[in-house]
Amino acid sequence: MTVLLEARSISKYFGGVQALKDVSLTINEGEIYGLIGPNGAGKTTFFNVLTGLYQRDGGDIAFADKPLRLSSPHEVANVGIARTFQNIRLFANMTARENVMVGRHLRTRAGVFGAVFRDRRTRAEEAALRRRADELLHYVGIEHRADDIARHLSYGDQRRLEIARALATDPKLLALDEPAAGMNATETEALKTLIEGLRADGLTVLLIEHDVRLVMGLCDRVAVLDYGEKIAEDVPAHVQSNPKVIEAYLGGTA
Amino acid sequence: MTENHKSWLGMALIGFVLAIAPIVVGASLGNAWVRVLDFAALYIMLALGLNIVVGFAGLLDLGYIAFYAVGAYLYALLSSPHFGIHWPFWAVLPLGAMVAGMFGVLLGAPTLRLRGDYLAIVTLGFGEIIRIFLNNLNSPINITNGPKGIARIDPITLFGHPLSKSIDFAGITFTGVMLNYYLFVVLALGIVFVGIRLQDSRIGRAWVAIREDEVAAKACGINTRNIKLLAFAMGATFGGVSGGLFASFQEFVSPESFGLLESIMVLCMVVLGGMGHIPGVILGGLLLTILPEAFRQGAGPIQQAMFGEVLLDPEALRMLLFGMALIAVMLYRPAGLWPESRHRREMAK
Ligand SMILES: Nc1ncnc2c1ncn2[C@@H]1O[C@H](COP(=O)(O)OP(=O)(O)O)[C@@H](O)[C@H]1O
Ligand SMILES: [Mg+2]
């Protein structure tokens, strides 16, 4: 098994509050890795540090055998980490297709000259870009909404669109922040199928999720954060019976 | 009739109207009104430039007129007796566009982390700084000639004919103002074309993405710093072209022409017309150039006719009506007079 992402002793402070305390975790290529923990445990903060939206205060990250230095979000996207957001962040007034096309910004080249003169290369790139966007919309199952404004999509479809947009960056690792939040049982089931499909197509998935059943049914391994600390990392069955985890979820502060 | 035929017919019609407009207006309303049309074309270019920054990329810029000033002064310095340099316009205009674009990057760079109100205030300051520089760069070395401005700027010369002189053709006398009109309209159409092409492109989508959600745009791999700077540069370029034309047309520039009120006026054209929607912005530019002028000329005589005397100062009345019109538009058509159809659908809900 090859390691895709290795985070060592990541820490992050917000003022006096330490949101991440020496968090280390290793994600293998091709696995679905769950990150769970009570609200405020630091899961989203970990995502933000990983994807360069926040700068970490300590620790290193290695991705695909290369160190991921303190870098800006677009550089992180460029090396192959894509993400979705806990509270959906789409380009609300753009169509679904345009949203996905923006996701491919990194993998396309056309500049001002190409935009104005529409030379052959730009036209070919634009056509390929549209095709790819439609493929991805089809892949997540919302191709019939391609021309609709993102904000008009149903909640579940917006989540799917966000995934399609993330996939457009050609990621190796897809990080999903509570993708099932606010979904009903049917939608959650469909999401599960989608994520399994992603893995089958060779993607590695890092999944933050509250829905314990979804996590346990889907993930190969799960890490548990509590007050910014990793308190467990194991296969789902073991995590579920770990006394520390039960304590974190059921009891207040230990 | 196919779509294609229809759009060709539409374009031919627009072309025809644009071509005869100065002749008809000149014959019926006089040359002063052709002059207003010239200014409408200049303002439309400005508004389209600002639309890239404010409408597409969502960056509220209150100092945009600075780039108009840069274009105008560059033309004035390189094409007037002030330094005794008389470069031809086809060299000065592109240079003006480039230099204005550079200023766009220069003034944009420090503001990249700012948004909304803060961005507006800092850009407002930058706009004023440029004007103050122009006002004071007359000593110790006299570069801009200070508040007195630069006069006797060369008119644009096309095919050996200076556009300030009238020409007789097909039984019609084309005045200098009319000749300038045709040049301005051609360049404005060029700018419209560039704007439309940019909007529907990888770069245009990146601008809108930043406007819609900057964090998500970053996460999608957009280098927001570069793409914002590109918006500032492109917007400034349009302003620089318009400024150069302004200088050649007026044959005179002074810092007075580039105050905050001008920036606000151009912003009003964009917002009133329909932010981010090119036809709307053109409409905004047209209305806000023509209507105030009509009020200015009409308010006095109408009052004279109705009350036998001028009760209200036309200038004051004009600003009052302008303010009221703006408030009305913001209340009843918050997305502008002619917004993009997708926004109109939103607002209708
Ligand atoms: N931008 C921020 N500024 C200050 N505190 C923050 C910020 N983001 C998160 N926090 C704090 O960090 C802790 C972890 O938050 P978060 O990572 O969102 O938790 P989770 O996603 O696990 O629910 C919380 O105490 C939260 O209040
Ligand atoms: Mg969270």
Image (cartoon, coloured by chain):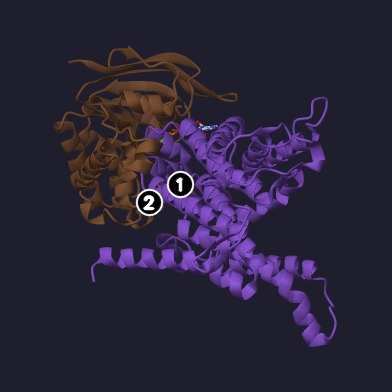
Tell me which corner region of the image, top left, top right, bottom left or bottom right, holds residue A118. Answer: top left
Q: Quadrant of residue A6?
A: top left
Left or right: where A111 falls relative to A17? left
> Residue B251 appears at what percent x and percent y?
69, 47
B124, above or below A3, in the image: below
The disc at residue A94 is 2
Which chain does the purple colour mark? B
- Tell me what residue is drawn at x 84 percent, y 86 percent: B308
User: Considering only vertical position in the picture, is B288 above or below B248?
Assistant: below
Residues under numbered marks 2 and 1 in contact, where contact means CB atoms less than 8 Å apart: yes
Res. A222 in view:
yes
Observer able to see residue A87: no
- Name the disc covering residue B327, or none: none
Chain under label 2? Answer: A
Q: Residue at x 83, y 25 (%)?
A: B140
- Residue at which label 1 appears: B212
Total marks placed: 2
The residue type indicated by label 1 comes to: Glu
Residue type at the position of mark 2? Met
